[in-house]
Amino acid sequence: MSSVPMSHILFVSTALFFIGMYGLFTRRNMITMLMAIELILNSVNINFVVFNKYLYPDKLDGIFFTIFIITIAAAEAAVAIAIIINLYRSHRSIDVENASEMKW
């Protein structure tokens, strides 16, 4: 059984990271910005798992960091969606460009 080279996995992780950064900086919708942040966090998770597997195959530190990041990302997504729903209810828009209308 052949293993996938580390460089291939890191290439995919880098691509996910930059797709997430592109989505974060170019989108105006808060939901798509939240999805872009999740892509960035998933690319970090891939890096943790890959470096743990190739550098320290007998330890699970990278896996524990990944589980911690997934937990934090789930909580962050729940809070962000609740905030977005409240903003939509009060302003009828979740467009970031309308941020001047969302000021107190």
Image (tube, rainbow, N blue to C red):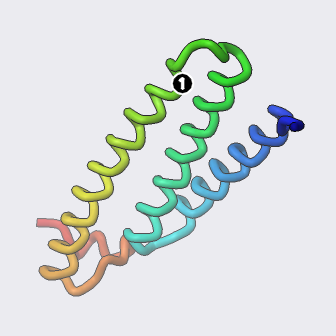
For the C terminus, which image quadrant?
bottom left
Per the image, label 1 sits on a secondary structure element best described as: helix
Rendering coords of residue 18 (x, y %): 66, 51
Q: Which residue appears at 60% of the width and 31% of the height?
A: 49
What amino acid type is highlighted by mark number 1? Gly
Of residues 77 and 51, the one drawn nearer to the viewer in this rendering: 51
> Where, by quadrant of the figure, is residue 46 drawn?
top right
Drawn side of residue 25 relative to residue 56, left or right: left
Rendering coords of residue 70 (x, y %): 41, 43
Residue 104 lies, with reference to residue 4, above or below; the image says below
Drawn side of residue 15 relative to residue 82, left or right: right
Residue situated furthest right in the rendering: 2
Rendering coords of residue 48 (x, y %): 58, 29
> Where, by quadrant of the figure, is residue 39 drawn?
bottom right
> Where, by quadrant of the figure, is residue 62 drawn?
top right
Q: Which residue appears at 63% of the width and 48% of the height?
A: 17
Residue 8 lies, with reference to residue 32, above or below; the image says above
- The residue singled out by tag 1 in the image is 62
Q: Which residue appears at 13% of the width and 80% of the height?
A: 90
For the N terminus, which image quadrant?
top right
Of residues 24 and 51, the one drawn nearer to the viewer in this rendering: 51
Sort mark 1 into few (<14), some (14-19) or many (20+) by Cα contacts within 10 Å: many
Drawn side of residue 76 relative to residue 1, left or right: left
Of residues 1 and 97, the one drawn nearer to the viewer in this rendering: 1
Rendering coords of residue 26 (x, y %): 56, 67
Residue situated furthest front in the rendering: 1
Q: How many marks?
A: 1
Residue 72 lies, with reference to residue 35, above or below; the image says above
